[in-house]
Image: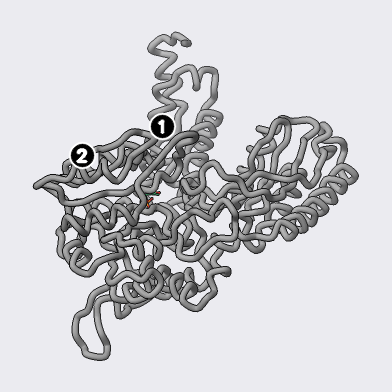
Amino acid sequence: MVQCTMAETNELLRALPSMDELSRAPWAQDFSALLGWDFVKKALARALDEARADAALLAGLGRAEASALVEARSRDFLSRKTSSSFSPVINATGVIIHTNLGRAPLAPEAARAAEAAARGYGSLEYSPETGARSRRDLHVEWLICHLTGAEAALVVNNNAAAVLLALSALAAGREAIVSNGELVEIGDGFRVPDILAFSGARMVAVGCTNSTRASDYERAIGENTAALLKVHPSNFRVEGFGASASREELAKIAASRGIAFIEDLGSGLLCPLGQSFARDEPLVSDCVKAGASVVTFSGDKLLGGPQIGVAAGAKALIEKMRRHQLARALRVDKMTLAAFEATLRMYAAGRSGEIPVIAMIEADPNELKKKAANLCRALRKIAREASGALPPRGGIAEMEIETVETQDAIGGGAFATDRLSGFGVAIRPAAMSAENLARAFRAARPPVIPTIRGERVILHMRALLDGDAREIARAFALMLRGESGAK
Ligand SMILES: *Cc1c(COP(=O)(O)O)cnc(C)c1O
């Protein structure tokens, strides 16, 4: 703390520019065109307040210097607000359904459908044929039924919403029986006991963490039981001794006792995957066939579409869910619906292999290796040129760059312990830490998100989209020249 006398303090404050002077500056006018005058005014006032409150900051500064300081602080703050903080990034992490990076990237035709829906009016809840009002989920219901074998279906905001709606509409005020082994938390606060409590259903947990049998459910059914609930444990797995009731057994019990069998499947696989570890992953159609009354699943996990939640199953139960008050609160917007319809149509047309998530999971390791080799070559060339053209920059360009094998992941809580072997480019910087190099990649425009393995930064090929490798090379070249990647 610098102690100032009253006179000194007054002197310092007089050195500060006035609000009026700041407002007239051309740069302030420029920001006003982007952010609006009200916001710019608030930012200037804040910078002035901060300077006033911090006498140490101003100590020894002349009027011009104090003015420059306030200006620099205001401009820095304002320029950070001019670009969207939610911007495209390049996913070089090798995690396909990366929850923090927005889960599934859409197929181009799904993205186009969303854009078309956004731009104008549409037949969202209207039938041009009859001129009458219609339902928004009719656009996708027939596709979901066709692809899963279900009688009826509805869509809501996400799978958490679908589970909540199913339990609220079908089991509120009554009991839902669930295995202790399935009272899981699925990332970011989706906890089965909490969702059950919130829905108003009373949870009856049966069996043990590692073993629950059909007879455990059967014994727990009473007067007030509304449903059996089965939850895909997703990111959790029991190793060693374990047993669980099959969905066929549960369906049979539920049917014979006249109660619902709700299955929260989570990922919502519509077509079998080639990976051996995915052999036991049920398709939505398997659950429907086994007799689940309602199956719920996400649109933006293994299905590869937009964020949406689907409930598919028996007509009477889906109808009951549709009429519930919550359905209105959880309904899906037109852009999402359009993107989802386009994605489902790709499945119907037998073109699921073109959906980015599926293509990334099924990617040929040889193709990934070739991509990695190409990027490796490009980055080496850039590094060589940078070290030749410039005076030594602390050896930054003398890094080791090579193609390496990687362990990639599906992500989104699916197959949490299984790995896909892939390829990437490893960079070991000579004169900086791997953390700092990774930070430089993240500072590129668009940001490149790599992983770090020991001393090396790894750029995984698996989740790169068309054009991403070129962007990475461009960002790398700018980094070595000490420039930011801003276009
Ligand atoms: C992912 C998941 C959810 C939540 O789905 P969102 O679409 O993220 O809301 C619920 N249940 C299971 C079993 C899941 O795997």
Is residue 169 visible to us here? no
**The label number, if any, that marks residue 48 in the structure image:** 1
Q: Nearer the viewer, residue 222 or 80?
A: 222
Disc 2 to disc 1, C-alpha distance: 60 Å
**56 lies left or right of 295:** right
Amino acid carrying mark 1 in the image: Leu
User: What is the total number of numbered labels drawn onto the structure image?
Assistant: 2
Secondary structure under tag 1 reads helix
The residue drawn where x is 28% and y is 57% is 251
Q: Residues within 10 Å of mark 2 (few under 14, many from 20)?
A: some
Q: Is residue 130 above or below residue 31?
A: below
What is the x, y in percent for residue 77? 48, 40
What is the x, y in percent for residue 28? 46, 47
* Direction right: furthest residue: 388
Q: Nearer the viewer, residue 287 or 103?
A: 287
What is the x, y in percent for residue 332? 30, 63
What is the x, y in percent for residue 439? 63, 37
Which residue, given by chain and number where applicable, does mark 2 sit on? 204
Is residue 111 visible to us here? yes
Please name which of the two marks, 2 or 1, marks the residue nearer to the observer: 2
Secondary structure under tag 2 reads strand
Disc 2 beta carbon < 8 A from ligand 1?
no
Q: Is residue 333 above or below residue 200?
A: below
The residue drawn where x is 77% and y is 36% is 428
Q: Is residue 402 above or below residue 286?
A: above
Q: Residues within 10 Å of mark 1 (few under 14, many from 20)?
A: many
Split into 4 quadrants, where in the image is the C terminus? bottom right
Amino acid carrying mark 2 in the image: Val
**The label number, if any, that marks residue 131 in the structure image:** none
The residue drawn where x is 44% and y is 8% is 3
Q: Is residue 135 above or below residue 52?
A: below
* Direction bottom: furthest residue: 129
